[in-house]
Image (tube, rainbow, N blue to C red):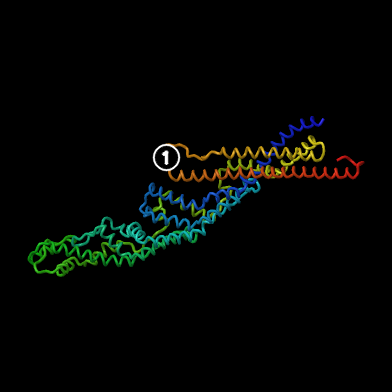
Amino acid sequence: MIWLRRVLAIPLIVIFVITLILALVLTHLSGTVGSAGFYNGQMRQAHVYDWVYDNLTPAALDEAGIEMPTDFPVDTPELKRDIVAVAKQAFPPKWLQGTFENATRQIFPYVMGDKNSFTITIDVQSRIGPMADGINGVVDNHTQEIYDYVTDELIVPAMTEQLGLGAALPYGITLTDEEISGFVAQAMPQDWAIAQFKSMINSLAGYLKGDVNNLNLNIDLAAVKTNAFSTLTTLADQKLETAFNDLPTCTPLQFSQALATLQPNTLPSCRPVGYTYDQFKQALETKLGMTIAQAVDQNVIDLIPNSYYFNDAQLRQALGEDMAKSLDEARKFIVDDQGQRTEQNFGSASGRADFDKVRPVIHAVRTWLWALWLIPILLLVAIGFLCGRNWKSRLLWPLGVLLVTCLIAVTLVAVLRTLVPQTIIEIPEETVPATKIDTMIADKADEIVHNAINTFIWGFEVKLILFLVFSGLAIAGVIAWAIVDRNRRRRLTQHDPDGPPA
């Protein structure tokens, strides 16, 4: 009745094939998709951390220069390279890699149900210092551009804000806003302006790190005002002399009459014959009781503040509402949260509640995965006893079933690998054309997915090959055992004819 037993073994063989493949797939999923090391390996294989600075960041800066123009000189290729260098110095690829891999090692035990919570630490605080050093290095490489920016966009507008459109001096002299701003800017030495800008950078870095709770930078402008006073006085004097030379001549009596009716903001209608400019100016100063220098000091210099304050309010005004909000969130994350994120920061409460129902199932499957392997093992034992006549055949039958199953599975997996499409992630068709960054990210994501699929399939194929090799070697061992045993029995029969047959 051996044939009946072998017919009864057919359903067991089918169930064995299904349970073996299921056990292999679940085990492989647990060791790959369910493991942080799988994702970390894919990121390293795709060189993502270097790609961020070599490709993604320059492209982002190119698009930012087109879509978000700014007064700050960031649209030059040299400065774009400097921005990338600063970012790479502040957050080098090794830091990105370590941060990502530490995060995955914290998250996956939670996702797999091994832990009920996780805490990710992103150490941004220690990187602010290197970032400030890198920015200061960029400032040293672009002193002229930074100097122009500091003077024209920051300090000079703040100093001349109260002057309006210029300054009207006695004697009909007017200093325009452009003249005052230009001479005030010239009064700022480049080394001094660069040092003030670096001080602003360091103050902002200290504020972001939490070294200080309020951003309050005070720049003393006394020396600038002194230098500006000297040059503006010279300019006013030159304008008065030019006006003097343009006046028609008259007699001393006519000049005295014009001087008697002179208004503070006008010039006499003529200049006396024989008067030098100094005599003319002295007569005007005596009449009005004010020198040119005093007029400049009173109408210009006194209206310039003695200090330039850069505080939280000015920073927020300069950044705009959205950027200021982002700055507050960044500082809260760095200082208050100490760069930490927990499971409470991800997703909504309802979403976490739903996922918490799934995690125990995942954990249970992983915990009892070993028990699933008992089913194909017991089925092999049953197949061996049903199909075999003796111990050797009871080993050869299950090993043969395992060998054939693995051989067919290896062939199917190899064919499956060739069917993986060349492009997996495609940018959806939209009315707005995809940007260069969208395309780059999609290409890199496609590369990662391809690598992951190939790694997953190859790993599964390797497991099948190992089972194939094991079953083949085991079959060879059983056959060798049978041959050795037959030869042994034959020798025994030859020496003892009455013994058992070979």
Q: Nearer the viewer, residue 492 or 105?
A: 492
Residue closer to the observer: 276 or 87: 87
Q: Is residue 249 above or below residue 433?
A: below
Given the image, on which type of amino acid does mark 1 rest? Pro
Q: Nearer the viewer, residue 166 or 454?
A: 454
Residue 321 horizontal/vertical position (percent): 42, 49
Element at label 1: loop
Q: Splitting the image into 4 quarters, where does residue 80 fall? A: bottom left
Q: Residue furthest right?
A: 498
| Total numbered badges shown on the rendered structure | 1
* Nearest to the observer: residue 20 or residue 68: 20
Specify whether residue 216 is in view: no
Q: Residues within 10 Å of mark 1 (few under 14, many from 20)?
A: few
Q: What residue did someone put label 1 on?
A: 433
Tell me which residue sits at (71%, 33%) in the image: 14
Q: Name which residue lies at 53% across and 56% down.
A: 95
